[in-house]
Image (tube, rainbow, N blue to C red):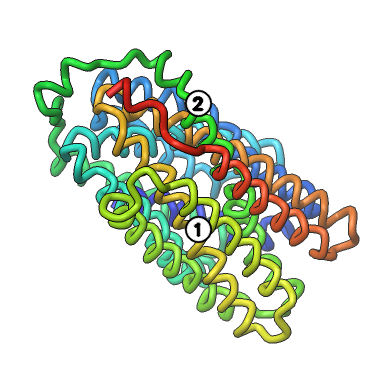
């Protein structure tokens, strides 16, 4: 549920981007910087957030994160200058950044290791449930209340969820087998594991696609494919539904079928992402664009589910938050690079998205190469 709330709040800025740009008279390049401001703060908190969750438990960190992002969701609706918008978006990201690693630490607290890959896939799929539901909530709120009123309502809803989480969720300290608890691994040793850095690079490359399309696809449909806001609100959820199904399935696949063969799974999905990006851009009718976008989201999200499930499958609870935080740091670094870079590319090519899709296809190929470099796992000796 928490990830659903997070992604509704996060998707709101993408859907309101055109309206914000018109009110503040911002160019695509500047709007890209606005999007990236969130991810700068979000990225900075990945590793610290995971480390703190490993030290004090997931519930306290999640509560603080929920509270901070609700404050700054509300504050987004009160901004009246570019400077204020950038500051609020940065603080929004800083507040929300500890939530993902703390959530995966929570999985390690509540579930034994042989069930964590499956539950990680289910958890990641809730991201896309939120993204799919977001347009159905955000667009009507924008039409009736404007983009400012929409952020005010979402902020209040966030505080309501904080109260619900505080009442219903109990902190669990340990859920490891006694033998596993004896094998505590120092966080510095985890950061030094080569496989984590290879996973980080693989997910960074695909996150350039993930964050780029999430941020700019609504604007692309509005300005290049000439859809109205209602049509965009109806079509935007479909790729996220495909992504939600993909990530939910990925945990089961990782758990039961692909032990020690993840490298081929990751590389294959990255290649298919590149293929369907090509078809998506060259599609002539909007139904084909959305169909190929759904396939892009399906395969790139399968990579996400596998990348975040693997550390939970291999590493003990005591460092789960730090491991996921490290990998997710790469994905979120792409979050502030990709939107801004795409904005500059669009501006440089006078509104054309040709170079944007070339950039995204190259990123998918880089992810495939990084995945193939993983090879056989060497870290079992630490377990």
Foreground of the two, 235 or 174: 174
Q: Is residue 155 left or right of residue 178?
A: right
Q: Secondary structure at mark 2?
A: helix
At 52% from the left and 71% from the top, the residue drawn is 294
The image quarter in which residue 229 lies: bottom right
Q: Is residue 91 visible?
A: no
Q: Is residue 61 left or right of residue 211?
A: left
What mark, if any, has residue 194 been given in the picture? 2
Q: Is residue 20 left or right of residue 121?
A: right
At 68% from the left and 74% from the top, the residue drawn is 279
Q: Is residue 213 above or below residue 53?
A: below
What mark, if any, has residue 2 been given in the picture? none
Residue 147, position in %: x, y? 56, 60
Residue 50, position in %: x, y? 38, 27
Mark 2 surroundings within 10 Å by alpha-carbon count, few (fewer than 14), some (14 through 19), many (20 or more): some
What mark, if any, has residue 149 been given in the picture? 1
Mark 1 surroundings within 10 Å by alpha-carbon count, few (fewer than 14), some (14 through 19), many (20 or more): some
Residue 89, position in %: x, y? 58, 40
Q: How many marks?
A: 2
Residue 359, position in %: x, y? 75, 54
At 58% from the left and 37% from the top, the residue drawn is 201
Foreground of the two, 89 or 97: 97
Q: Is residue 82 above or below residue 355?
A: above
């Amino acid at each position: 549920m928490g990830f659903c709330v997070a992604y509704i709040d996060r998707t709101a800025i993408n859907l309101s981007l055109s309206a914000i740009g018109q009110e503040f008279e911002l160019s695509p390049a500047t709007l890209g910087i606005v999007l990236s401001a969130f991810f700068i703060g979000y990225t900075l908190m990945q590793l610290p957030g995971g480390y703190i969750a490993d030290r004090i438990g997931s519930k306290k960190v999640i509560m603080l994160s929920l509270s901070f992002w609700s404050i700054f969701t509300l504050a987004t609706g009160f901004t009246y200058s570019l400077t204020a918008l950038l500051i609020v978006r940065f603080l929004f990201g800083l507040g929300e950044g500890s939530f993902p690693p703390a959530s995966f630490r929570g999985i390690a607290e509540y579930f034994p290791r042989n069930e964590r890959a499956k539950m990680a896939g289910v958890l990641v799929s809730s991201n896309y449930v939120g993204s799919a539901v977001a347009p159905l909530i955000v667009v009507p709120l924008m039409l009736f209340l404007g983009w400012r009123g929409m952020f005010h309502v979402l902020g209040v809803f966030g505080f309501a969820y904080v109260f619900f989480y505080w009442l219903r969720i109990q902190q669990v300290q340990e859920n490891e087998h006694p033998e596993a608890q004896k094998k505590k691994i120092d966080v510095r040793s985890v950061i030094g594991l080569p496989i984590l850095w290879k996973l980080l690079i693989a997910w960074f490359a695909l996150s350039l696609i993930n964050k780029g399309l999430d941020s700019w696809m609504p604007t692309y449909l509005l300005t290049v494919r000439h859809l109205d806001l209602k049509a965009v609100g109806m079509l935007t959820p479909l790729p996220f539904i495909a992504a939600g199904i993909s990530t939910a399935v990925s945990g089961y696949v990782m758990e039961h079928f692909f032990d020690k063969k993840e490298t081929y799974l990751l590389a294959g999905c990255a290649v298919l992402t590149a293929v369907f990006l090509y078809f998506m851009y060259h599609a002539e009718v909007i139904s084909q664009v959305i169909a190929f976008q759904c396939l892009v989201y399906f395969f790139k999200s399968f990579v996400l589910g596998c990348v975040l499930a693997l550390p939970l499958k291999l590493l003990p609870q005591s460092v789960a938050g730090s491991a996921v935080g490290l990998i997710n740091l790469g994905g979120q670094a792409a979050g502030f690079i990709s939107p801004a870079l795409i904005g500059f590319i669009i501006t440089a090519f006078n509104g054309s998205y040709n170079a944007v899709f070339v950039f995204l296809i190259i990123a998918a190929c880089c992810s495939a190469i990084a995945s193939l470099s993983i090879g056989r796992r060497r870290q079992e000796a630490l377990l």
